[in-house]
Image (cartoon, rainbow, N blue to C red):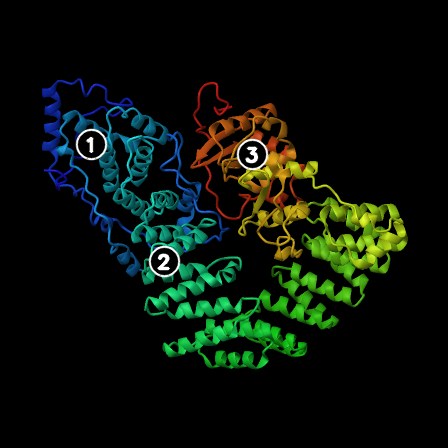
Amino acid sequence: MANRRCQTHRPEQFFFPRTPPLSPPLLPAMNASVYSASFAVSKSVLAFPSPPLRLRHAPSALPVRSLQTCSSPTLLGPPRSSTLATAQPLQQEEASDEEELAETVRPSVEPFHDVAAEREMRSFPSPELEVKELEELPEQWRRSKIAWLCKELPSYKHSTFVRILNAQRKWITQDDATYVTVHFMRIRENEASFRVYKWMSQQHWFYFDFALATKLADYLGKDRKFAKCREIFDAIINQGRVPSESTFHTLTVAYLSAPVEGCFDEACSVYNKMIQVGGYRPHLSLHNSLFRALVSQAGGRAKYYLKQAEFIFHNIVTSEFEVHQDVYAGLIWLHSYQDIIDWERIADLRQDMKNAGFKESTDVLISIMRACSKAGNVEETEKMWLMLLESDCSIPAKAFVYRMEVYAKVREPMKSLEIFEGMKKQNEPVSSAAYLKIIEVMSKAEETEITETIFDEYIGSGMKPVMPAFLSLMSMYFNLHLHDKLEIAFSRCATGCCPNRSIYNLYLESLVRVGYLEKAEGIFNEMHTNRTIGTNAWSCNAILDSYLALGECAKAEKVYDIMRQKKYEIEPHSVERLQEVLSLNRKIVKRKISMKLDEEQREILVGLLLGGVTIESDEERRNHIILFEFSENSNIHSVLRVHIYEQFYEWLTLSSRSNDDDNEMPYRFSTIAHSYYGFFADQFWLKGRLMIPKLIHRWLSARVLAYWYMYGGLRSSSGDILLRLKGGSREDTERIIRAFQAKSLRCRVKRKGRVFWVGFQGTNADMFWELVEPFILESVRSLLVPDGCFSVNSKKESQPDDFDSEYKTDEQSPLRNQ
């Protein structure tokens, strides 16, 4: 009887060697009686039935982990394309390093999914998957071999795993491989199940089985293996099929559960496809989970997801679900953070809350106060304040800040001061946000004594941050032409913390204004040579104006060359003076400069490419774009972002150059499409992945290694220096190691998913640091020095646990222990 329910023999009962060869060659030649006897013994040992292989409701048996919030934001990247149908025979592990990171940091992420959502995940209709029983196979040797595979494969690492499967090509069929895949799903060996399916999909006899792909994707998604689940998801779409509702649901949940950059954006993408492509109506739990993850985005990124939040709200309403109170509050909160407030939409949401019987919570009142303070609406702000006083809860510090802000908008700074003094009289401590706001308000009102008193009080309290307070104070001194006090404040800032470019620009312009050209020239040179600070259009225009006023033609021309190279906009009055002083009419202004990267920019770009920066090319591979992406959760990336933005300013798109404020610089920006990047695309980026050129040993300079370390490296807890090489092959890594050997640097390599980690230990780490230290940005040097902090990035990275077990290679390979 074909495809009937029956018991599955447990492979561990078969009497085969514990350390078998790649295939069991002795089995076909065994005596028939002995072979039958061993099979009979194995049947008699089984004393209890095992679950059937017809997995109509198999997903319900899986335990479902509670859904968890995404702790790190992410940069939207293109969805992963499937390689199941066209990939070459698998040679290396395809596990995702992002999945490893998710497994590493998952315990620190708080769950927000409820029990009802877990029940809903079991209620999806599932395609019926029928698999032949082992006993139904006509050949006894085939049954034995399949059972042997089921027993032995999970215990092997990937390389041996694939070699064992390759050794079975002469006899194994689609049905045999399907049985092994399903068996591993039954015993919760989902990783092994995916490997078998991946190998099977690369064979010439493979035909796509929608039910099998759906089951495997669901199992992987429930196990939070989002990269593997997405690979099968894309394979289903590439076959012209629409994934089942369960696959959409589990993949979205898997993305939300992973605290990895970009996962939330992928979750939104899958959720949108679920509705727009699949035509499904997601369960209420999925709507709520995605919405809660949206408003939980860190770094102020949630405000950019307003359209997605409105889309989720629209789907909840059109599906006739009950809208939770937190959804209303979250939407109002998002609207209050927008640059342009949609008052009609906020009024509609408040009315909908009232019609639903919800009382406006403290969060809603605070959100409305925030929106009103931006618009300078005192009346509505005070109305929300009175509602807060009438409520039983304690008043948040933000309410005081918004009241101070709204009165500052209507030019009543003393009223803001009165609110601040009233806040201090309360039992609760005054927050740093309140101090910074009142310092900003009083400095703009040019109340010198009050500002200085509050400033000294804030600095003495030890609160952080102090840079905004210094900036407000120095701006007041600058506007009041109090250069001496500004210089003292600058000195205090330089000794107490690391000043940023805005602080330097204020001091530079003040020096130019009072005529201290020599000091101004020294500050400008310090900014220009210090890679952490850098110069911008403001500082260049200030020093250029002073040179032109004093007739310093040669110095003015040098500054002008810098501005032309960086494409800084020159102030009109400076252009007129430039024409007069240099006697070049308008030729110097109209003279074109060819777009070329200097030597420093080329070395920086090579280091960033090794660290993970990507290149996009057009179809003809004539023009290329460099995509710079930095982590918002990394202190070093925040500093490096400003430096790279300045270094490649002239190459950036107009949209990327729209704001020169250090605090408003985007964490993701790109260059213009240009043919000059063709060399880097041909050498380092081919077919959408990183490749290492054969001449890499000529280009691994100290500056290249320094930027590779800052962008894609980290310090391990054991004191090792690790460099990440993402997307390269084994041969690419060997070229890197040979280049290090030429520099007398001994290292070890370990693979984690699709990432190679190059590790330097002990004296080799010290030698590496001595090599790159001159090119490390000064403000982040303390975070990277061997005796400093733990890691390059503030967030946890997926890294090898132990470098003592080096990556095993052939005897001639440089990847062996050095």
Secondary structure, mark 1, is helix
Residue 172 locus on image (x, y percent): 24, 28
Q: Are marks 1 and 3 in contact (CB under 8 Å)?
A: no
Distance from Cα at disc 1 to Cα at disc 3: 48 Å
Q: Position of residue 779 (x, y in %)?
A: 65, 47
SS under mark 3: helix
| CA neighbours of label 3 inside 10 A, class few (<14), some (14 to 19), many (20+) | many
Closer to us: mark 2 or mark 1?
A: 2
In the image, 459 versus 282, the foreground residue is 282
* 3D distance between C-alphas at marks 2 and 1: 45 Å
Which label is found at residue 275? Answer: 2
2 or 3: mark nearer the eye: 2
Instruction: Give the percent coordinates (x, y) of residue 647.
Output: 67, 45
- Label 1 crowding class (10 Å Cα cut-off): few <14, some 14-19, many 20+? few
Tell me the mark number nearer the camera, choosing from 1 and 3.
3
Report crowding for label 2: few under 14, some 14 to 19, many 20 or more residues within 10 A (C-alpha). some
Q: Assign the N terminus to one quadrant of the image.
A: top left
Disc 2 to disc 1: CB gap under 8 Å = no
Type of the residue with mark 3: Phe
Q: Which residue is mark 3?
A: 684
Say if 564 sits above or below 139 in the image.
below
Residue positioned 45% across, 75% down in the render = 348
Q: Is residue 511 visible?
A: yes
The amino acid pointed to by label 2 is: Ile
Q: CA distance from mark 2 to mark 3?
A: 39 Å
Q: What secondary structure is found at the residue carrying circle 2?
A: helix
- 257 vs 680: above or below: below
Report the front residue among 276 and 14.
276
